Image (tube, rainbow, N blue to C red):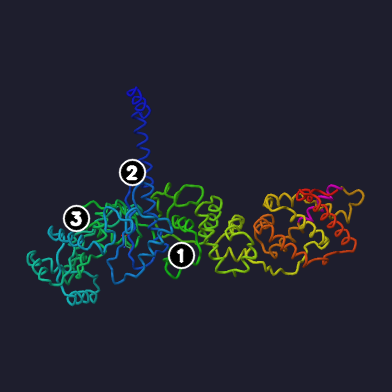
Amino acid sequence: MRSLRSGLLARRSWVCMQCRQASSTSVAAHNRKTKLPDFPARTRFAPSPTGYLHLGSLRTALFNYLLAKRTGGQFLLRIEDTDQKRTIPGAEKRLYEDLQWAGLQWDEGPVVGGPYGPYRQSGRTSIYRDHVHDLIQKGHAYRCFCSAKRLDTLARHRSQAGLSPGYDRKCADILHEHAENRAAEGETHVVRLKVEEYPSFEDLVYGRTGQNRPVKKLDFIDRVYDDPILLKSDGHPTYHLANVVDDHLMKITHVIRGTEWMPSTPLHVALYNAFNWTPPQFGHVPLLVDKSGQKLSKRNADIDLTFFKGKQGILPASLVNFAALLGWSHTSKSDLFNLEELSKIFNLKITRGNTVVAFEKLWFLQKAHAQRIVSNGGSELDNLVSNISNKVKTTIPEKKLSSVLKSRTLSELITPLLQADAKSFTNASEFITRNSTFFTPDLKRPTYTPNNPYIPIQSLHTAAAALTLVPEPHWTIQTHKHNISIYDGGSTLLEDTPPTKGQDAEIAHAAADKAFKKELYNYLRWALSAGKPGPGIPETLAILGREESVRRLREAMDLTVDKGAINPVTARRAKEREAKRKAEAETQDQSWMGSLAPRS
Ligand code: GLU
């Protein structure tokens, strides 16, 4: 039995050789095209706490995150705080908050830990020193005791002669034991990498990059070399050393970073070679520029995330979606993706050349994500509602608010309002301003101006009163839609001006009904929201709730009573009709539907 089962299982999973080859070739071909590795990538975001997360660095973090998630790998966070002097207090904490706000939770790094920590470079000084020691032993690095004065003079002479900067490798000639003794005695020095060549490398975005540039330059002053500093005189590593050592020890397979780091990459590859390590794969993402081709800066919106989060009220999903589209192309029909969807389709088809940032797209995505969040519900909707609630509480006086809310909670008002208004959503403040009439009982209506002065105001009062007969449990958008649609405005009008002989009664009725409904909408919008554009009338009635809607309609009636009567007969008939309707409503228990039925 057991062997039969395992035989079946084996047979089920058996794939013929040709198919297996075909499928593995197609996966390989797909991966070649999309430049995705066929193993789980380990990526990292390595910010320096010398500034905050901005649009460009959010994109770098995001691409690294997505590559790791797409391939089932890990995304690391490493704090590169080697430049202690430029470190901004609080920047590290803000980085964590901003990354988490965007949903880019790291698998290894500060706070969460991991097997290759510590993940803050200031805690790894001894690791760098040990590695530099190794390089010195192997002859790939040397101690340089040149004084600042000597280096200054050298630099000045070279600059005066119009030559590029460089070091003459004076200290490379010091005997190893001699140099070690001087260091042991505490003589101030740095450690330099002995670079013979800057190798070219294969960039995932730009292809083969660099020219295997030899670094030895002979000019009329002396031999000069780059020989970059690895360890500073205070014993701390430079960015290059720490970055390479950490990427290797943390088993990083892919380094996705901005093109501003591209000139450093040949040096990094030289360092990998000196250590005899395999470098990770590098992919440099293009610069972000504004519409006039200027590099994005503080002046033209490469502002830190606080601006987008706080001032502009951008939703995390919208900003992540926007950042993902900066330089990355996909084949889906729509540009609308949340983080999870991006994690499934991301690849390394990244465009070369500068990426123009057009903020109109951000607002388009914002509206689209707001609608999605509203229709999906769940925690994202709860967050959005509570965000708006907090803003409402700080902008609308408590008394006004409680007067419209009556027995409802603020989120019970905001949720349906958001559902009706999501297509226009930009941010909480704008939402509150646009929908201000829902948050206050003081409507400040302008004088009512009918579009069609031939429709008696009393008939509008009657229709409005009829709508309010709906009892609380049935006070829904659907009921109001239905009731408005079946309300027979045609009869109301034709009662006063019946069709003349020969006129098609049905056509006349339909035309009268249309004219009446148009005016009714105009009146109700004025009555309920002071004429401001916004959610439809059935939605407005439902959002305001029965009590507040009734109050507003009564108030509106008091403001317009008798004003629109065009002749005494019309006024009398309208009054009679209203009296009849009231009497009917009082006698019928289920009157809310019956009262709206077409009149005889
Ligand atoms: N610490 C560097 C930065 O601030 C990291 C560069 C890299 O990703 O190698 O951007």
User: Disc 2 or 1, which lies upstream in sequence?
Assistant: 2
Characterize the local packing of mark 3: few (<14), some (14-19) or many (20 or more) Cα atoms within 10 angstroms: some
Horizontal side of residue 471 vs 341, given as left or right: right
- Which residue was labeled with disc 2? 38
Q: Secondary structure at mark 3?
A: helix
Ligand 1 position by quadrant:
bottom left
Q: Which residue is mark 3?
A: 275
Question: Would you say the residues marked 2 and 1 are in contact, meaning their CB atoms lie under 8 Å apart?
Answer: no
Q: Identify the mark nearer the N-term, 1 or 3.
A: 3
The residue segment tinted magenta is 505-517
Q: Amino acid at mark 1?
A: Asp
**Which tag, 3 or 2, sits closer to the chain's start?**
2
Q: Find disc 1 in the rendering and name its residue.
A: 290
- The type of residue carrying mark 2 is Asp
Lateral position of residue 239 relative to residue 435, left or right: left
- Towards the viewer: 7 or 354: 7
